[in-house]
Structures are given as C-alpha cells and as structure tokens.
C-alpha cells in the first residue's frame, strides 16, 4: 500500500471551472443507470442491482478517466435525476482521480465501485428526513447513521466485491477526530480509501443544490473542503481530492 502523504501545493484556480466533461452520451448512460439504482422505494427500481451491471460501468468510468486525458467531470442538478445519482457519480469521479494521484492506480476500480453504490442504504431513510432542514430526531439520526451498513447488506450476495470496496463503503462517514459514524473510529483506524471517499463525498455534496441549501461555487466548495482538513477529514485525502478537480 503506498504511503498516504500530502505533497501538493494547492492553488484554487480557474482550472476547476474549465473542466471538460466526460462524453455526454456516457454521462447520460451512467446517470440513467444510477437514477434507476437510487429510485425511491415504492416505485419500481428500473435498474437491476447486480455486481456485473455496476462493474461494467465502473470499468468504463475508470478507463475513461485513466486512459483519456484525466479531467474532472462535475454533474450539476438536473430535473428527473435524483440527487443521490448525481452525488455518487461526482464522488466516483473525484475518488477515482484522487486515488490515481495518491498512487492507488491498481485499485481505482474498488474506489469507483464503492463510490457509485456507497449511499444505497440512504434509500431506507424517508425522503423527508434526507431533505430535512431541521435537526433530526434521535430515531431519524439512527437511520441515517446505519446507511453504510445497510448498503453492505444490500450487496451481501456479491461474492466478487473486494474487501477494499467494502471497507470504503463502511467507513466513508468515519472522521479522524472520532466524530463520524457508524463506529466513531479515529484516524489510524480508518482505511485510506475511506478517507479519500469521505473527502470526495463532502466535495460532491456541497457542489449540488439541496432543498434546504444552495450549492457552493467551485471556489467556495474547495475552500470549505480545505477548511475541514485536520478537522474530521484527513489532510492528505483533502489534498488529493482537491487536486482531482483542478486541471493542471
Ligand atoms: Fe453516505
């Protein structure tokens, strides 16, 4: 496992907004798939949740990001595309690129797989809770805090899923200062992949509109992410994720 150290000198810059997107046809295809995956319970899930189906798209995503010109791609809110679909695609792009920068070139598939499915467990949380602007009740908080484990339960029959993918999913809300969930792990107890995913997850979330708040500009989002380095988020993970969205 490569040493997880921070080396980058960061500069928030115009490169962020100049990003060229992935091919539109592929973006539509993967968002269509994720829309089916993250459809509300009660409406029929149009996408079949199988390892093979997800892994085909992850391989394609990793190939495009790795063997094309590595460029960030940021999806913005769209009608009829659930927040979780946009969020998981953005998080996957950031995590894959950050993983490449961190030296995990042979494990980008695991990061991409974890990123695309990491919030499946949020679908058991009622939509009004997920979108609530008010503090959550203890019971609602319990539901939210269970979502990494619920995601793993959803895929328990996937015999090919890697241990790296599982641990990234399980620990993506753990925080270095012990304030995270589900286990309240601290720095050394959190896998580097989960640290990268945690930072990618935060950056993706604040770049998208939610019913209770507006998205941040790219510059403000990067400043917010960097402000969390050492205060919950791993500084090196923040560093790599920040660099993942800057063009060189
Ligand atoms: Fe999550």
Image (cartoon, rainbow, N blue to C red):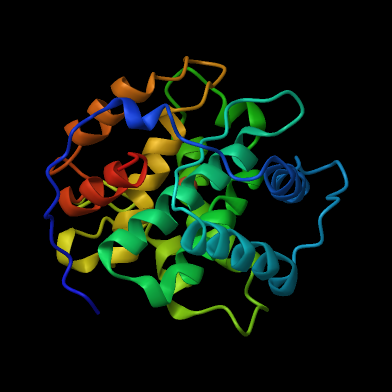
Identify the residue shown where x is 75% and y is 51%.
33
- Left-right relation of 178 to 50: left
Towards the viewer: 56 or 71? 71
Where residue 11 sits, quadrant-wise, is top left
- The x, y position of residue 49, in whole percent, is 75, 63
Above or below, 34 relative to 16: below
Q: Quadrant of the C terminus?
A: top left
Q: Looking at the image, can residue 177 be seen?
A: no
- The x, y position of residue 103, in whole percent, is 28, 69
Q: Looking at the image, can residue 18 be seen?
A: yes
Residue lying farthest bottom? 159
Above or below, 63 relative to 31: below
Identify the residue shown where x is 61% and y is 68%.
59
- The x, y position of residue 102, in whole percent, is 26, 63
Above or below, 37 relative to 164: above
- The x, y position of residue 13, in whole percent, is 26, 27
Above or below, 28 relative to 120: above
Q: Quadrant of the N terminus?
A: bottom left
Towards the viewer: 75 or 237? 75
Q: How many marks?
A: 0
- Left-right relation of 152 to 80: left
Identify the residue shown where x is 17% and y is 41%.
229
- Left-right relation of 195 to 157: left
């Amino acid at each position: 496992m490569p040493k997880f150290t921070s080396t980058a000198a960061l500069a928030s810059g115009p490169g962020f907004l100049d990003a060229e997107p992935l091919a539109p046809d592929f973006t539509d295809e993967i968002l269509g798939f994720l829309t089916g995956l993250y459809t509300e319970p009660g409406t029929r899930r149009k996408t079949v949740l199988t390892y093979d189906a997800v892994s085909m798209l992850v391989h394609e995503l990793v190939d495009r990001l790795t063997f094309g010109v590595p460029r960030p791609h940021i999806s913005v809110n769209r009608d009829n595309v659930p927040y979780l679909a946009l969020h998981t695609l953005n998080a996957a792009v950031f995590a894959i690129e950050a993983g490449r920068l961190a030296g995990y070139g042979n494990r980008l598939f695991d990061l991409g797989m974890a990123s695309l499915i990491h919030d499946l467990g949020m679908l058991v949380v009622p939509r009004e809770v997920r979108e609530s602007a008010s503090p959550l009740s203890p019971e609602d908080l319990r539901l939210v805090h269970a979502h990494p484990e619920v995601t793993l339960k959803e895929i328990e029959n996937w015999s090919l899923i890697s241990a790296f993918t599982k641990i990234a999913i399980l620990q993506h809300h753990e925080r270095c200062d012990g304030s995270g969930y589900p286990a309240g792990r601290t720095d050394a107890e959190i896998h580097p992949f989960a640290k990268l995913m945690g930072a990618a997850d935060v950056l993706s979330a604040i770049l998208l509109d939610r019913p209770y708040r507006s998205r941040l500009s790219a510059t403000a989002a990067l400043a917010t992410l960097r402000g969390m380095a050492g205060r919950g988020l791993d500084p090196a993970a923040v560093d790599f994720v920040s660099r993942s969205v800057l063009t060189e």
